[in-house]
Image: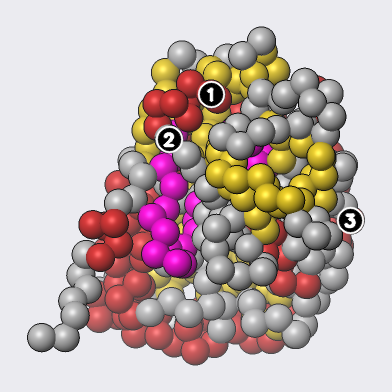
Amino acid sequence: MMTALPVPTLAAGPAGLTLEGVALADIAARFGTPTYVYSRAALTGAYQAYQKALGMRKALVCYAVKANSSLGILSVFAKLGAGFDIVSGGELARVLAAGGDPGKVIFSGVGKSVDEMRFALETGIGCFNVESAAELDRLNDVATQLGKRAPIAFRVNPDVNPNTHPYISTGLRGNKFGVAFTEALDLYRKAARMPAIEISGIDCHIGSQLLDPAPMAEAAGKILGLVDQLAREGIHLDHIDLGGGLGIRYRDEEPPTPTDYLKPLLACFEGRSEALCFEPGRSLVGNAGLLLTRIEYLKPGVEKNFAIIDAAMNDLARPALYDAWHEIVAVAPRELPATRYEVVGPICESGDFLGHDRDLSVAPGDLLAILSAGAYGMTMSSNYNTRPRAAEVLVDGDTVHVIRERETLEHLLKGERPLP
Ligand SMILES: Cc1ncc(COP(=O)(O)O)c(C=O)c1O
Ligand SMILES: N[C@@H](CCCC[NH3+])C(=O)O
């Protein structure tokens, strides 16, 4: 059964589940619960799968920081030589604090503020992915004031349906992201005349949790047509950024490997001189992490039985937000017939569930592992119900590093004051 689980370094041992050989029960005893637990070997393996798929191609993998922005995770990728895709000044500060190379940073996002542009220009980031005409004007002004030139790519919206959840699809005409395909040529012409703008590339990202390479290959074909048209006008690009989006297995999905996903894209760019760039998030971290939690109570109900755990929607929002499925397994299943449970947290919302109808052989106090929680888990967590956020640890062979201490109530109340 364990080989069917999506976390590559998770295994069943005599003392229950282990990650890279370290017992999850020991981690819970040392650090408490709820705790996010990551595997360095799994992070490294996921990054290397991209490197292998890219082979000798001139290419840069820019990890999408929004998927998991903890310094410990960023430092693993920085040491591997990755670039970073950021969407805020805060994410840039994190990349720098983790030892990332600013020259390998690309800055995406539809709402860059003047302060964020200034910070990024002063830091010397690799490229701004510009998402509107107004942003281009603002960037030209800010760079002029600083006496700098801003390297840019336009994020072009190719109007391709990625066949994913509507909340995480970004490349359709009706989305807020990027500049319209039909508008792109004129914007490049305008940018080419701006003194503080340096045209560097083109970018496109159509959505997340993609399980089929075909929509991205269609988008790449459209982008390529634009690149050639620009070249005919004397506007030559150094790089082509094909975004992120490759999906992972949460339940029974069969996502392509990076090699299979990139194959049709690389075929499009065969023999071309531009560097390629990718912005994967979920596929680098999603299955390298799990959320370790303890059952507080088992509560039989009239219609359903509830397993009430010490993690909640504030720790992992994806089930409540997207009705997303995360596999939930007992760390040390009991010799009991399985009971069907609603796995829920302590928050005062009926939407506070981590999983519906899960068959578990457990008793109160037992540990559960909520799998595939490495991406968009901690980064989307909150303090709702004044709940301190979970700790995070990273397993690295025999060593378990605390990469984020559990929040305390002092952290939560800091900066607030009652009226005098
Ligand atoms: C601009 C941009 N790049 C990269 C990503 C990373 O996507 P994923 O985590 O699906 O690889 C996202 C999120 O969808 C994004 O908005
Ligand atoms: N937050 C989403 C992914 C959004 C991707 C960001 N562009 C998720 O948890 O699946």
The residue located at (52%, 71%) in the rendering is 109
Q: Identify the main secondary structure in magenta.
A: loop
Q: Mark 1 vs mark 2: which is more N-terminal?
A: 1
Could you tell me residue 169's position as x and y percent? 74, 69
The answer as to whether callout 2 falls within 8 Å of ligand 2 is: no
**Camera-nearest residue between 161 and 72:** 72
- Please determine whether, in this image, residue 383 is positioned above or below residue 32: below
Q: Which mark is residue 32?
A: 2
Could you classify mark 2 by the number of other residues whose Cα lies within 10 Å: few (under 14), some (14-19), or many (20 or more)?
Answer: some
The mark closer to the camera, 3 or 2, is 2
Q: Which residue is the site of mark 3?
A: 214
Task: Tell me how far mark 1 sits from mark 2, CA to CA.
Answer: 10 Å
Distance Cα–Cα, label 3 vs label 2: 44 Å
Q: Does residue 298 appear left or right of residue 357 in this picture?
A: left
- Type of residue at label 2? Gly
The picture places residue 209, in percent across and down from the top left corner, at: 75, 55
- Report the span colored magenta: 367-393
- Amino acid carrying label 1: it is Ala
Extreme residue in the top direction: 14
Marks 1 and 3, Cα distance to the nearest angstrom? 42 Å
Q: Which mark is residue 25?
A: 1
Residue visible at 65% across and 41% down in the picture: 370
Tell me which corner region of the image, top left, top right, bottom left or bottom right, holds residue 195.
bottom left
